[in-house]
Amino acid sequence: MVDKPCHAVAVIGGATAGSTVAEILAAAGCQVVVFEQNERPYGKIEDGLPRWHDKQREMEYRKIDERLRRPGVTFVPRTKLGQDLDFLALARDWGWSAVVLANGAWKDRPLDAAGAGDVVDRGLVYQNPFVYWFNHYHEVGYAGPRYEVPDEAVVVGGGLASIDVIKIIQLELYARALRARGVTPDVIAMEHEGIPKYCQAHGIDDPSALGVKGGILLYRRRIDDMPLSPMPKGANEKQIAKAGEVRHKILSKCQSNFLFQVRPQTLTRELVIEDGRLRGLVVCKSEVQGRDAAPVPGTEETLRTDLVVSSIGSIPEPLTGVEMKGVYYAFKDWDTGEYGPLPGVFASGNVVTGQGNIKASLDHGKQVAQHLIDRYLDCGPASAAAATTAAAVTEHLARKGPLPAEKVDALLERARARQREVGYDDYASWIQKVTPQV
């Protein structure tokens, strides 16, 4: 129960951005209800960050736990926007001071090739479900999708996420080959040590003796262009050249540790579909012109494979009632995450950035929360930076007054009713109950 007027904010999504928004707003005196679609609030840290990042994952889990346990934050799991919550009702009818969408970028950008939609999970797999499978298939009671990784599987991509995907393929291929030699592999140890050293530690001096041909990473542009390290804004020629060198070194080290093949300046032209399954790709060389990669006529060839993993980016899931501009939500201000069609609705993290990057999600969460405090909820001093990003917020919203205590109590009771419906008790007990056993 609250004993004085205050703001009440609904946050959709409890991972890095959502928990950061919740923490900052609660510290400013708001009551914050975090609605999370999954049982656990860890988002892409749990389901999109490969499990060999074990120490980082645990560290990020604890940070999220601390934010969601703090006073003023109410956590509601197993509650998905568009399924258990109606977006328009939540944003227009419930009566929140503000609504923040921090529901991430869970939809894979579609592979641009005729027939791709017909062979999903029949030879064509997208990054998000593929990494989810790798992260969870070893758990007791896992009932999600299962994938066989054939030799010479192909990954289409070029960013850090595609490097993770090709590493998963290599780890799975060499784990299977080691099992055939009577070795019980530990894929996490193999990732930490690199495949050559891991094989040597198990009596195999030359990994090629295992007969693994390896996966192939296709990238449409040059290795210099691979977004494996940041490029300074407004970079000069010297900085661009230096960034290219760093990217070559990163890729070279990854290849020496994980033994995959890379084919830069390669475009997918067609899918080879036989009997309703993907059996290969028709590819060609590309000519790079700025950010574009144009096909070079007469260079077409067919790569036969039984598995293609598309890793070309993630975008927000379309939701009933949420207006879109292209593949993104209809934002009025991309810096603050202000949503154009409805006042009082903002977005934060990967749902805005379209990235799976923890730091980008964290930074954007802080930025949006501070904007709400400084300019929208009017419950903290405005900083110059926040004032700049808040220029589009109307004056009457900037002076929006707090809600009566009884209205806040009614909102919190609706949240508690949902908690009871899903069997939630308290945060610590809930996390313990829903943590999977390995």
Image (cartoon, grey):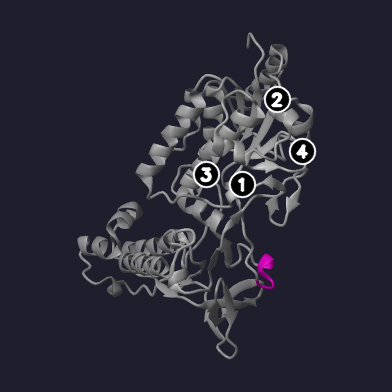
Residue at mark 2 to residue at mark 4: CA–CA distance: 17 Å
Comes first in the chain, label 1 or label 3: 1
Neighbour tally class for label 2: few under 14, some 14-19, many 20 plus, Cα within 10 Å: few
Residue shown at 49%/22% (left/top)? Answer: 70
Which segment is the magenta one?
Answer: 113-118
Answer with the quarter of the image where residue 96 lies: top right
Residue at mark 3 to residue at mark 2: CA–CA distance: 28 Å
Tell me the SS state at disc 3. helix
Residue behind mark 2: 399
Residue at mark 4 to residue at mark 3: CA–CA distance: 23 Å
Tell me the SS state at disc 2. loop
Q: Quadrant of the N terminus?
A: top right
Q: How many marks?
A: 4
Neighbour tally class for label 3: few under 14, some 14-19, many 20 plus, Cα within 10 Å: many
Q: Using the image, tell me which numbered label, if any, was put on residue 361.
A: 3
Placement of 178 over or under 434, stated as above or below: below
Placement of 241 over or under 54, stated as above or below: below
Comes first in the chain, label 2 or label 4: 4
Answer with the quarter of the image where residue 206 lies: bottom left
Q: Using the image, tell me which numbered label, if any, was put on residue 288.
A: none
Answer with the quarter of the image where residue 302 lies: bottom right
Q: Are marks 2 and 4 in contact (CB under 8 Å)?
A: no
Residue behind mark 4: 342
Mark 2 residue type: Arg
Based on the picture, tell me whether residue 117 belongs to the magenta stretch: yes
Placement of 346 over or under 207, stated as above or below: above
Residue 431 placement, left or right of 413: left
Residue behind mark 1: 351
| Residue 432 appears anywhere in the view | no
